[in-house]
Amino acid sequence: MVLLEVNHKQLETFINKHYDTNLSLFIWGTTGIGKSESMEKKAADTAKEHKREFVKWNQTTKKEKKEISLHPEKYFVLMDIRLSQMDPSDLKGLPGMSDTGDTVDWKIPFWLYVATLENSEGFLFFDEINLAPPSIQASAYQLILDRALGEVTIAEGYSVFAAGNRIEDKANVYDLPKPLQNRFDHVTLKIPNIEDWTQWALDHNKDSRIVAFLNARPAMLMPPIKTKSNDMAFPTPRTWGKNCNRLIEGVKDIRQIEILASSCVGRGASMEFASFLKFQRQINLQEILDDPKSVTKITELDMKYSLLSLVAEWYDAHSQPKDLEKILQIANYIQAEFAILLLRFSKAKHQAKFKKQVPTLKTWKVIWNKYGKYFDL
């Protein structure tokens, strides 16, 4: 499959343009790299821009859905539609007698009814669309191209998007029929590199132990999927950033972390993660805080990355100016790549405090002169 490849930031631009122009966009990509998450983020951002309340339709109650239908002007709705779970009639609806009794009306699904309401806004997102058999995919042709289905038309405030894995991703997908292909514009989402994933993880307050480990072992973020492997759990940006992050939250025992992590990233990755964490036991953090220059004694790469996680967690609990000054002094003595990452880790823990405090600290001018062009305050 030869398609334009985009990173997550570029994908946001494509989503914006297709929403503004009411064109349909198909997002291709391997599993676990953030296709669905990107759609959710842009839906939430668009809701904020339009001064509307963001709603994930699939996670609302019947009562809340009724409220949305009565006051569509208040909401921006992300509707995640899974064609693979539907019959053709689930889109078109069911026939019923009209009020006069001499004709037939189609009773459309409630989600589709809400998407047709005047002043209604949102994304119709057909996720994993190519998991659906071709006969089910065909039922969506008119909705995707003409923004209509039968006798109803989608509101101008809605745009249609879809996402799916590729044949080469071994996801047991169906080929997308040519007529349906031609109803979309197409891009492929790249696997995020470690720099982009790290920024996302820090922006979303992910566990610094995971972030430090993956910076030490970038290949573990998304190793090639082994098609003949029997492993049910394997590393992806999603399993690290969502599943593993939640499971090990607050857990200190390394053996327990290894066991928990293995359930979502697999045995091999969890063993490497646990081995990495053991380096923290060899670091005397208090000694380094008391004498920042002593950080130069740490020579092993894994121990340097482990130190970043330790210092970040320490700063999370000690966020006074004097504590940040110690971190700046440590950054002054370690190699540039680690200094910059340490600053990013620390800033992510207490962003407002960090921005307010650092300009007042004596070591900041030295740090800024060294790394200011690489670091966004």
Image (tube, grey):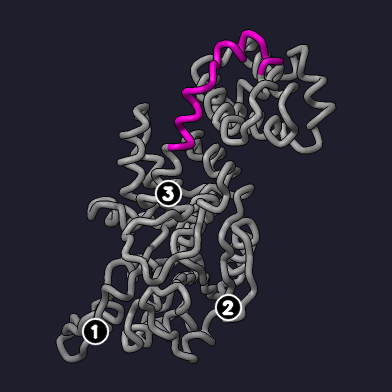
Res. 269 mark? 3
Residue 120 at x, y percent in the picture: 44, 62
Amino acid type, residue under disc 1 in the picture:
Asp
Q: Nearer the viewer, residue 34 or 139?
A: 34
| Span highlighted in magenta in the image | 275-294
Which circle, 1 or 3, is nearer the viewer?
3
Q: Residue at point 56% right, 16% down?
A: 319
Dots 2, 3 in contact, CB < 8 A? no
Residue at numbered disc 2: 185
Report the mark closest to the observer, 2 or 1: 2
Looking at the picture, does residue 214 appear above or below residue 69? above
- The earlier-in-sequence mark between 2 and 3 is 2
Residue ID at (34%, 47%): 262
* Crowding near the residue tagged with mark 1, few <14, some 14–19, many ≥20 C-alpha atoms within 10 Å: some
**Disc 1 designates what residue?**
105
Secondary element at tag 3:
helix
Q: Nearer the viewer, residue 134 or 256?
A: 256
